[in-house]
Every structure is written in structure tokens, then in C-alpha cells.
Image: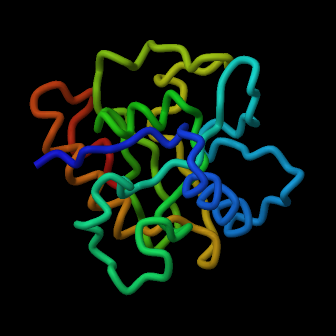
Amino acid sequence: AEMARTSAASDTSSQQNFRSRLSMFYGHGESQKPKCIVTGVEDAPDSFRVVAAHIWPRSAAETFPFKTLENGVNNPSNGMFLHQTIEQDMDRLRVCFVCDPFQISAKFVVLHKGILEQNLQGTNFKYNDLQFKELKFTIEQRPSFQLLSKHAQQAFNHSGNDLSMNEQEVEC
């Protein structure tokens, strides 16, 4: 079953706390603007937002697979800073991250071929420019590869025949 997700752009205090924990987790100072982990662009409130995105959605907290993790679904390893459009398409299972735990990296994968030419609001990027982009992490500052893998599996299953590539192209 598809996980129902809530928008990370909401201004609840829970979301603000998550954003603050995520900033500390990824080594951003409180005065620094967050950057999208995929594009590298900073938050630009006048044209687009970089949001604190949950990998496992807050709306599905009761099914969160790691119940013993401190703060549960709001643990910073369950999050990443993403351009608002990428976060929305991750919610819709149109994009995902394919992890390589041996290289401590992940590839950004656009699954839905219909969005490859879509511009990301406020940037010069199209999804096609970002397809298979490799993201490097450190052991201490990385999202949960288990959660990213669960999301990727669900996104692949959801995509059906609309895939923008074949399985061999996404191998790490």
C-alpha cells in the first residue's frame, strides 16, 4: 500500500523542531540557510522553499519501522533538506534515492518519465539534469539508508510501466 504523506512545508511546531534538529544533524548553523541535498541551492523564500522532508512520512508515524529510534519519525536520520518540488515528487513516489552503503552514497533517481523535462521552480535545473546524480555522505551525517531503500522499493513498485529507465541503469 502506498504511504500517505503530509507536506513538509507546514508550519507546525513539530515541523519547526524537526527542521531545527535536521539543521544540527547535517551541520548547518542556525543562521545558515538550508541547501537542497540534490541541487545544492539555498532556501529562497521569495521564489521556492528548501524544506525539511521526512523520508518516512509523519502521517504514517504509527507504522514507522524503527520504533526505538529517538524521536521516532522525527529523528533527523529520517530527513533531508530538499527543494520543495523534489519533496512533493518524493511524496508522490515519482523520485527516489538508490543507496550504496559501501560507498556511503546514494543516487537521485527520477522514476516518472513524464517529469524529466520539468523545471524546478526558481532554479535552472530540470529533473533530466539531476538524473542519477550521486550524493556523498559521511557515516555521521547521512539519512537512514534503510528508510531511503524502503521508500525506493515502494516508489519502484508504484511506478509500474511509467519508468524513465530500466533497472540496470540504477545499479550503484
Q: Quadrant of residue 140?
A: bottom right
In the image, taking residue 56 as reference, residue 84 lies left or right, namely: right
Q: Is residue 172 visible?
A: no
In percent of the image, x 59 and y 42: which residue is there? 11
In percent of the image, x 40 and y 19: which residue is there? 116
In which quadrant of the rendered image does the C terminus lie?
bottom left
| Relative image position of residue 88 (x, y in whole percent) | 42, 32
| Relative image position of residue 73 (x, y in whole percent) | 41, 66
Q: How is the image coloured?
A: rainbow
Q: Residue furthest right?
A: 31
In the image, taking residue 86 as reference, residue 90 lies left or right, namely: left
| Relative image position of residue 5 (x, y in whole percent) | 32, 44
In percent of the image, x 32 and y 52: which residue is there? 59
| Relative image position of residue 135 (x, y in whole percent) | 57, 53
Q: Nearer the viewer, residue 135 or 140?
A: 140
In the image, taking residue 150 as reference, residue 41 lies left or right, namely: right
Residue 9, placed above or below residue 37? above
Residue 106, placed above or below residue 24? above
Residue 172, placed above or below residue 145? above
